Image (tube, rainbow, N blue to C red):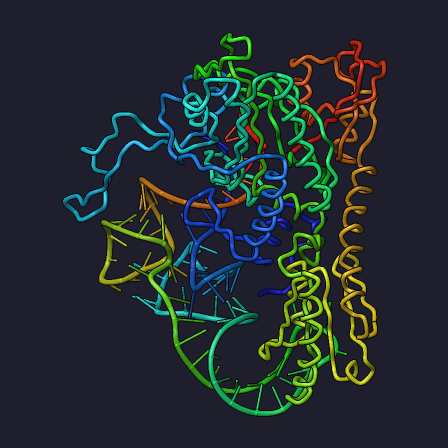
Amino acid sequence: MSKGIISKDEDYSQWFNELVIKADMAEYSPVRGCMIIKPYGYSIWEKMQSVLDKMFKDTGHSNAYFPLLIPKSFFSKEASHVEGFAKECAVVTHYRLKNDEDGQIVVDSEAKLEEELIIRPTSETIIWNTYKGWIQSYRDLPILVNQWANVMRWEMRTRMFLRTSEFLWQEGHTAHATAEEAVAETEQMLDVYADFAENWLALPVVRGRKTANERFAGALDTYCIEALMQDGKALQAGTSHFLGQNFAKAFDVKFANKEGKLDYVWATSWGVSTRLIGALIMAHSDDAGLVLPPKLAPIQVVIVPIYKHDEELENISSYVKTLTNDLKAKDISVKFDNRDTQRPGFKFAEYELKGVPVRVAIGSRDMQNGTVELARRDTKTKETVQQEGLANTIEALLEEIQSNIYSKAYNFREENTTEVDTYEEFKRLLDEKPGFLSAHWDGTPETEQRIKEETKATIRCIPLNNAQEEGKCILTGKPSTQRVLFARAY
RNA sequence: CGGGAUGUAGCGUAGCCCGGUAUCGCGCCACAUUUGGGAUGUGGAGGCCGCAGGUUCGAAUCCUGCCAUCCCGACCA
């Protein structure tokens, strides 16, 4: 492992790339736009999955699995959905390879599929085709299903975790008898995401709704959580869509209501992806490496022994054994790094790079004094503490780190959210102090589009529970009733 | 798909103008000394110079074609 990474002030995007690779989260794959998620990175995803999965189950959802491949014809059924995804779909056209005259492996042109198959960019179409068979009566509703899956979108420009061609996610797909119930579901799942982001990722988010321009293809309304990264760019961290009856109509999914009349089913879909790992990295980390919130860190505590002779190591090890048991009893994950092939200083740097929240260093001097050196990753401070009650000390410290990381991110967002009333100031701040800009907008897609073309900033969302106030659109001066959040975004 | 750049050991690179089978650092292996913030010494292994043609006695180097990656634009969780 080479020494250090580039400073995030010097080159933020290179800092991010180096961090992902050097912290052992992921690496590039032979296929452009795809990534190999390494064990350290994947175990963060597993933690996210297990927390979210429980939240989904607690709100009444069940998991299921739908196929990777979708008949091409399904895509032509919902007009705006097709339009949204058609440009980035990978297509399977053949089902066999063969050796040609030169012994090269080639596609067997004899083996052409009658109907081409699309690798799912999202599963609405195959799911609604399936739901048609599941739903006849209001008694069959609601259907509350989630699936954990991979999807593929042929992106032109990709970045590790933030935008890769293939990515891992979960997609919830629900069916309801009424619009009200579907809207309530959409809002409920947005709250689940916000709760998860704030309490687990330690990532403060703004809950809001997307404008028509930014809405999911095929949705009537898209809700989102938006987060601010340390370079002042916004990142959409999760979305929840009210799909209305669009897919029910496209796939002819009707049910008999209590009055015996046929009606189309109301739908929602909602998802978060491995992009959350990118959010985690960009929100908290620093020039020394990752900073992980304790609740999602694969290793919460690392213990590094410092010794000269084997007897010393044995002495330390026997103490570490009881400490480890105490910590495990509290459900705290611990790693005792007793490798003799690396020196302590090297290990310190390595675990800082990998974002381990708490480090315990124990040497012979500590053993004599009944102390350890306790270092925290978020502040990079260290202190000498008593061995007595250490598990409790660490437990409390982990909680403090979790909340400190959140506060730091929260304060950053507050400091970088600015109310703006003129277009000149809007443009100036985008360059001088990037972040969320809260400004009046006349509500038209044309204005939003023009601002985007001129400044590269988009409307990230119309915050929920937004204060209503009289104002004038920063671009056109037309009347407006509320501020919306603008930013340059990932 | 347009504009720019780059492909040499696991990683980062020198050499290319001016042709003679490849430089340095990190990492790796062995041994010794080390161990409270990225150790040091000695010895060693590792290469189809992106791929395919061409020019030449001889190509990492010159020529042609292809492929890949990165950066900048249009698309996006």
Where A77 falls versus A315 (above or below)?
Answer: above
Quadrant where the C terminus of chain A is found in the figure: top right
Quadrant where the N terminus of chain A is found in the figure: bottom right
Name the residue located 51 percent from the left edge and 42 percent from the top edge.
A168
Q: Quadrant of residue A347?
A: bottom right
Q: Is residue A242 visible?
A: yes
Q: Position of residue A13 (x, y in %)?
A: 63, 45
Name the residue located 52 percent from the left edge and 17 percent from the top edge.
A265
Q: Position of residue A292 (x, y in %)?
A: 68, 54
The residue closer to the viewer here, A263 or A50, is: A263
Q: Quadrant of residue A273?
A: top right
Q: Is residue A230 visible?
A: no
| Farthest residue, direction left | A101
Where A454 falls versus A340 (above or below)?
Answer: above
Q: Position of residue A468 (x, y in %)?
A: 83, 17
Where A312 falls versus A285 (above or below)?
Answer: below
The residue closer to the viewer here, A366 or A145, is: A145
Name the residue located 65 percent from the left edge and 71 percent from the top edge.
A346
Would you say A262 lies left or right of A427 here? Answer: left
Q: Position of residue A44 (x, y in %)?
A: 60, 52
